[in-house]
Image: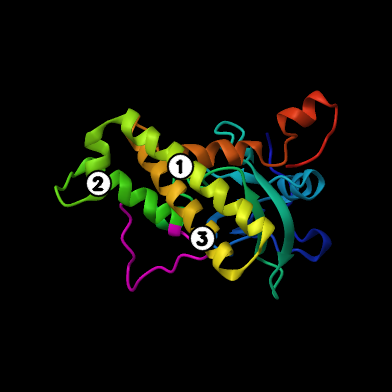
Amino acid sequence: MEREGKGRPDGIEFGPDGLLPVIVQDHRSGEILMLAYTDRSALELTLETKQAWFWSRSRKKLWHKGEESGNTMRVMSAALDCDSDTLLLQVVPAGPACHTGSDTCFLTQGGVPLMGTVKRFGSHVIDDMDDAVQSRKAAPSDDSYTCRLLSAGTERILRKVAEESGEFIVAAMKAKMRGSDEDLEDTAGELADLLYHSSVALASVGMSLKDVEKVLAGRRGKPASAEKLAGKEKEY
């Protein structure tokens, strides 16, 4: 497909090659996800479909982000900088932005910053917990509770998940009925325990919470199953 858009349509300063650099930012966390390029056709498609379209310099063609991987990007806003020669897209990604599987192209697996420490935006506490569980599985330690759980086997871990699930339900019911600060803290604590033990259970069967994240990302913007059966079109 031939590129269009050389020149300056609508006051946008496309480069001599007809391309405009695009900074892609996570709409929710503020994290910078990737740098890409667009031409006039890709930009028009982006604005029209509210999906991220770019111009692939390597393949010399229009590129719908996620057309092969499924990791599309829903565009929430688009803005030009003060010189009208750089575009900022704020998106809600349906999966990792980078082809390596990383959330962002600027923190690829094994990547080392040229200087300083690259700041991650948003909360990654759950990711860190899940990574720690996976690390314990890969390098067992005798004094680790996680390792002791894993060595006890999946059945023992699942019994613990069931136990923690029941404790979370009880705590949530108390919070609903009484609503004291202590009840709310207990509910959050019980859910934290349930998430942790669920992470260990996933690790025991060769999975992680990142597998769950991919499923949730794929469901984003789609009707839930019960709503499909009811004929309703509503995001969950």
Mark 3 is on which residue type? Asp
Q: Is residue 170 left or right of residue 148?
A: right
Q: Secondary structure at mark 3?
A: helix
Is 54 drawn above or below residue 59 in the view shown? below
- At label 2, counting other C-alpha atoms closer than 10 Å, the crowd grade (few under 14, some 14-19, many 20 or more) is some
Q: Position of residue 77 (x, y in %)?
A: 74, 59
Contact between marks 3 and 1 (CB within 8 A): the answer is: no
| Dominant secondary structure (helix, strand or loop) of the stretch shown in magenta | loop
**Mark drawn on residue 186:** 3
Mark 1 vs 2, N-terminal side: 2
Q: Position of residue 126 (x, y in %)?
A: 45, 54
Mark 1 is on which residue type? Lys
Mark 2 vs 3, N-terminal side: 2
Residue 148 seen anywhere in this rendered image of the structure: yes
Q: Position of residue 140 (x, y in %)?
A: 18, 44
- At label 3, counting other C-alpha atoms closer than 10 Å, the crowd grade (few under 14, some 14-19, many 20 or more) is some
Looking at the image, the residue that sits furthest to the top is: 229
Contact between marks 1 and 2 (CB within 8 A): the answer is: no
- Camera-side residue of 16 and 96: 96
Label 1, on which residue?
A: 210
Cα separation, mark 2 vs mark 3, equals: 27 Å
Q: Quadrant of the C terminus?
A: top right
- Camera-side residue of 159 and 199: 159
The type of colouring in the image is rainbow
Label 2, on which residue?
A: 136
